[in-house]
Image (cartoon, rainbow, N blue to C red):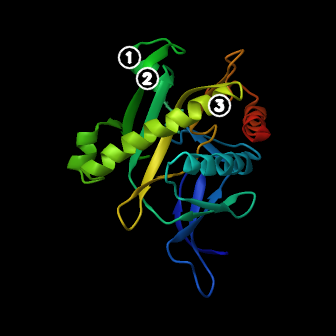
Amino acid sequence: VTRGELRYEGKAKRVYAVGGATPDTGQYIVEYKDDATAFNGVKKAQISGKGAINNAITVAIYPQLEAAGIPTHFIRQLSEREQLVKAVSIVPVEVIVRNVAAGSFSKRLGIEEGTPLPRPVVEYCYKSDALGDPLINTDTALSLGWATEPQLVRIRELALKVRDFLTPFFAQRGVRLIDFKLEFGTLASGEVVLADEISPDTCRFWDAETNEKLDKDRFRRDLGGVEDAYSEMLRRITKN
Ligand code: U5P
């Protein structure tokens, strides 16, 4: 499988059509970059090895989500930085699931970071770099035609199913899953599938013993040890 035309370039990934004489229609190649951004691209850097680590982490997790009954876009790993995925139309909504107050939730509501939430909170943001991913609700997404009502119901159900799988998965590896961001796509049939990565770029991971941050907050908050934290997460995820 070889890369065809570049279809999309985001902050951390590039998406290509499949190239060659007989391109596999309905499939894309996703390439993970080392670029890191925070605060909507205001802060930029390269984190060496990040693309390969995030690809490896996502590749390790996605088949387990599939096995747990969550349909995804993932087909297979192609190389250190590349995956073959089903072509989907991305729903322009970032779905955030929170187990513990942190980040923008703590700031917005004045709740101390680290406060456990008695039940998970699902939030939705409009995926727009220009607008800084503003918080929306499902009525916004419906009214603006970003998804249908059954698709939004399914997205929430799948997001909570991902949370129910990942929370104990990480706990078994000595990691508290504080919160995470998901993206969903639709297939030509309209079926909703999980897309995008699950990695220290898109999740908050705290060490279960020490509460040490093992995620992108090390970059966002200039805590140092970014590469080490990402490698440590890969090690824990692929250990068993
Ligand atoms: N998050 C992303 N991308 C964004 C914004 C947030 O992946 O553009 C993730 C963070 O890594 C965190 C969760 O795990 O969503 C909630 O972030 P925040 O709203 O508290 O900043």
Residue 3 located left or right of residue 40 = right
Label 3 CA crowd tier, 10 Å (few <14, some 14–19, many 20+): some
- Tell me where residue 182 appears, x and y as whole percent: 48, 43
For badge 2, the amino acid type reads Phe
| Distance of label 1 from label 3 (alpha carbons) | 27 Å
Which quadrant is home to the C terminus?
top right
The residue lying furthest to the left in this view is 143
- Tell me where residue 198 appears, x and y as whole percent: 59, 43
- Tell me where residue 104 appears, x and y as whole percent: 45, 25
Which element type, helix, strand or loop, lies under badge 2? helix
Q: Are marks 1 and 2 in contact (CB under 8 Å)?
A: yes
Residue 172 visible somewhere in the drawing: yes
* Residue 105: numbered disc: 2
Vertical side of 31 occupied by 159: above or below: above
Q: Which residue is mark 3?
A: 170
| Distance of label 2 from label 3 (alpha carbons) | 22 Å
For badge 3, the amino acid type reads Phe
